[in-house]
Amino acid sequence: MAPAISLQLYTVNAALEPDLDGGVRRLAEIGFDTVEAFAFVGRSAELKRAFDAHGITAKTGHAFLVEETIPLPDGSVMTAPSHADTFAAAKELGLEIVIDPFVGRDAWTTREGVERVAARLNAAAVEAAEHGLRVGYHNHDRELRPQIDGQPALQVLASLLDPAVVLELDLYWASAAGIDLVPFIQELGDRIVAVHVKDGPMHEDISTASIPTDQTPAGQGDVRLAEAIAAAPALEYAVIEFDGFDGEIFDGVEQSYRWLDATLNKQEVSA
């Protein structure tokens, strides 16, 4: 069965903030019936009303589970919502998986740092299970560039996680870190239940330290998206995302949706 096509709402958040209903309506018109929630704690009821009005559900969502304080690009620090508030909002919105999208660079440079991340995700998974939810982790490049015992730090994390904890592999950031996607995905196997479908030219200076603005609609860049998606045996969600796009964002999202829909249909027919 093909994974559901989704969209990380961070991609269009600038359009949703002034007009949530209008932005969600545009996503439904493109063809989305599933999205990945962004900054949903504290506005879950508002999001659900907009989703319900346009036949959309959110099955995955990003929220901080490992760290209690999060550094922001402007130098300030935000306090993460409590696990209790996060899981309550997730249930109200109808999520199935709450995915942590960020743990700072220093955590991935030593085995002790990775062990700490794993322990916190494992503990969060126990709490989440009481609400009928799963927990996951989403990578950038920082989790894949450092090598620990000859393996990328994210792979070490996977070996330390409880089976209940899943991964959402960002295919763009993994490629930017030099990962050969297909064998890496095959190695992680059933652990990967979601991917971020993101594309663009690959060059040496790609880093989260300076977010690229030259990302492209899916299928128009250098990331081996189709092969990576086909290699994931337990994939449930293929989530379109842009970090930076020099164009009209809904146009980029629609081009990605059309490419992904055609690719998944082709793979299902040939399976």
Image (cartoon, rainbow, N blue to C red):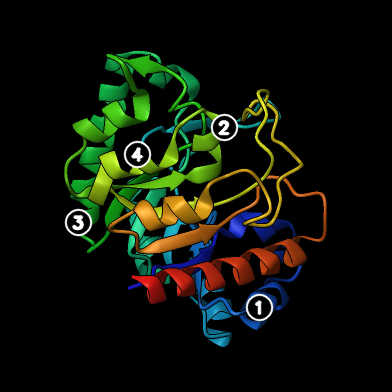
- The number of numbered discs placed on residues in the rendered structure image is 4
Q: Is residue 125 left or right of residue 60?
A: left
In the rendered image, residue 60, in percent from the top left (x then y), is placed at 41, 61
- Disc 3 to disc 4, C-alpha distance: 31 Å
Foreground residue among 101 and 93: 101
Which quadrant: the C terminus? bottom left
What SS does tag 1 mark?
Answer: helix
Say if residue 142 shows up in the picture. Answer: yes
What SS does tag 2 mark?
Answer: helix
Residue at 68% over, 60% down: 12
- Per the rendering, the mark at residue 183 is 4
- Per the rendering, the mark at residue 30 is 1
- State the residue position of label 2: 176
What SS does tag 4 mark?
Answer: helix
Question: Which tag, 2 or 1, sits closer to the chain's start?
Answer: 1
Q: Is residue 121 left or right of residue 34?
A: left
- Disc 4 to disc 2, C-alpha distance: 16 Å
- Amino acid type assigned to the residue bearing label 1 in the image: Ile
Give the farthest residue toward the right.
Answer: 247
- Amino acid type assigned to the residue bearing label 4 in the image: Pro
Question: Which tag, 3 or 4, sits closer to the chain's start?
Answer: 3
Q: Where 147 falls versus 234 (above or below)?
A: above
Q: Nearer the viewer, mark 2 or mark 1?
A: 2
Neighbours of disc 3 within 10 Å: few (<14), some (14-19), many (20+): few
Foreground residue among 20 and 134: 134
- State the residue position of label 3: 129
Q: Quadrant of residue 158?
A: top left
Question: Which tag, 4 or 2, sits closer to the chain's start?
Answer: 2
Q: Nearer the viewer, mark 3 or mark 4?
A: 4
Residue at 76% over, 42% down: 214
Q: Nearer the viewer, mark 3 or mark 1?
A: 1
